[in-house]
Amino acid sequence: MRCESDHGIFVTIRNGYRIYLAVYVDDLLVMGQREEDIAEVKYLLKNRYQMKDLEVARRFLGMDIEYENGSIKFHLKQYLSALLERHGMLDCNPVSTPMDPSVRLVPGMDGDGDRDGFAHVKEYQQIVGELQFASLVARPDISCAVGTLSQFGTKPTSTHLAAAKRVLRYLKGTVDMGIVYSPPPGDLFRCGLGRRSGDQKIKNWLRRDDE
């Protein structure tokens, strides 16, 4: 059954337990409470589609995945490191906040070119777009900054670009931060990952602390 709020999520019930399938292009994420139910769903899918069963997942759709003591952490260390390098910020000095509260950002006007200097539009839009991805996936702490920067994509000035690069400097110092899900003790939750094409084999198993 397809989820009404997200058409990329499917829910089915096997042996009284729910199984969730998240589909993105040719990547499948299968989640459930019992290993045998996940195996049954994957068996049915394999019989209908050409698929590969994958091993332990460390990356999925740009996210880094870590497991420790029954918890699961999503972060973007590899993505952010590549982002910093791409914009020449790999060796920058980190800052403690994504935005400077003393700097007021206003829309760039035609007369601002002499005073403030206009930034390269494509460079600015690329940085903001990449930051938007990070904020949506595993870095909600920069959401406010990204929302503010997104308002100035048409005529960004050097001040706007400096503000965007400040977010990069903040990420430089917090590159290991992410979202951690720590389940309550008592039962088992497993997460299987599949792909319909490709060579890398990935499969996730997430266990409770008392497992």
Image (cartoon, rainbow, N blue to C red):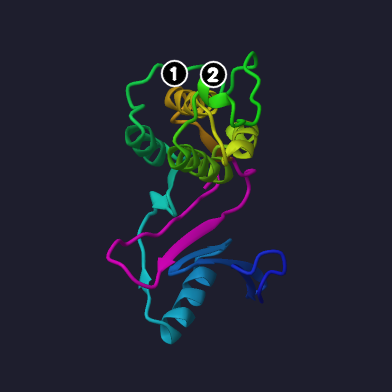
Compared to residue 60, the image places residue 31 above or below, namely below
Q: Secondary structure at mark 1?
A: loop
Query: Residue at 38% of width from left, 76% of height from top?
Result: 51
Residue 206 is inside the magenta segment = yes
Compared to residue 149, the image places residue 60 above or below, namely below
Q: Is residue 29 at all visible to an observer of this figure?
A: yes
Q: Which residue is mark 2?
A: 115
Q: Quadrant of residue 106?
A: top right
Q: CA distance from mark 2 to mark 1?
A: 27 Å
Q: Is residue 70 at all visible to an observer of this figure?
A: no
Q: Which one is nearer the viewer's eye here, 15 or 99? A: 99
Label 1 amino acid?
A: Pro
Q: Position of residue 79 (x, y in %)?
A: 40, 41
Indicate the quadrant containing the N terminus: top left, top right, bottom left or bottom right: bottom right
Q: Quadrant of residue 87?
A: top left
* Residue contact at pointers 2 and 1, CB within 8 angstroms: no
Label 2 or label 1, whichever comes before in sequence order = 1
Q: Position of residue 77 (x, y in %)?
A: 40, 36
Q: Secondary structure at mark 2?
A: helix
Compared to residue 66, the image places residue 37 above or below, namely below
Q: Which residues are magenta?
A: 182-211
Q: Which one is nearer the viewer's eye here, 70 or 31? A: 31
